[in-house]
Image (cartoon, rainbow, N blue to C red):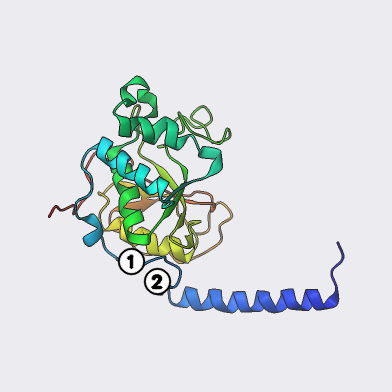
Amino acid sequence: MRRSPRTVLRAALLLVVALVAGAATAASPAAPAQAWLSQPAESRCVETCVNVPTTPQAAAQKLLEYNASGQLIIEWAERDIIPKEIQPIADGTIGATPQCNIDLRTLQTLIIVIRNYGSVQVSDLNRHCANDGVATCASNPTSRHCTPAGSPNAMDLTWIGGGRTRGNDVSTNVLLPFLDSFMPPGSRAGQAAGSDGCGAYWMPPLANISRFADYCTHIHVDFGSTTAALRGLTTR
């Protein structure tokens, strides 16, 4: 479809504005998150780490509540996450389909993220029982979405609050230091500047989360091979 000169000029002006805004963000990587979040957020897990459910069943039940309220959003291609994974854990019937189980720390992390940012959108958890037909355990059996057996510990997040998380954006750079404040050493994130066509971008320093290359369609987070619990969880 041919565009008019006015349309082309308008598009060029919008591009210039976007580039200027992007440059400002790059120059100030710690820009306040509140501009796009649905609620004020902690930079470190303090209040949001109080009274986090300590059992898989209790955590899954809380996630079902968040799903019903629209705070836990599951992408359509992975819609089986709720009925095949979260619901059986919440019901205490996951023993009938143990391949659909999810690591407790993953469930707890989703709860903490929702508490802090208001909502989260998920595109992948346990691929054994919910997947898009392309990224499957058959195509990548060593993925943390598939291992360890009976308790995969990975999550792919595509939105937090009102911010899109692709790995190479401001939203991700707000999220990762927050996760780093309570995830155990040995955890991992799929963020690596200059890889997989994602371009060069600033990445915040992290103490407990290492990085590996991943596509910039989401932010992948997992617990690697560590079995350590989340840090800093408190009760009142």
**Where's the C terminus, which quadrant?**
bottom left
**Where's the N terminus, which quadrant?**
bottom right
Residue 27, image x, y percentages = 46, 77
Q: Secondary structure at mark 1?
A: loop
Tag 1–tag 2 contact (CB < 8 Å) = yes
Q: Amino acid at mark 2?
A: Gln
Q: Which residue is mark 2?
A: 34
Q: Is residue 236 visible?
A: yes
User: Quarter-wise, where is residue 100 in the image?
Assistant: top left
User: Quarter-wise, where is residue 144 in the image?
Assistant: top left
Write the residue at 38% across / 25% down: 99
Look at the picture and state if 24 lies above or below 69.
below
Count numbered badges in the picture: 2
Depth check: give the residue in front, 106 or 91.
91
Depth check: give the residue in front, 209 or 13.
13
Look at the picture and state if 28 lies above or below 43.
below
Mark sitting on residue 90: none
Residue 222, image x, y percentages = 36, 44
The tag earlier along the polypeptide, 1 or 2, is 2
Q: Amino acid at mark 1?
A: Ala
Q: Residues within 10 Å of mark 2 (few under 14, many from 20)?
A: few
Q: CA distance from mark 1 to mark 2?
A: 7 Å
Residue 43, image x, y percentages = 30, 66
Q: Which residue is mark 1?
A: 41
Look at the picture and state if 129 lies above or below 185.
above
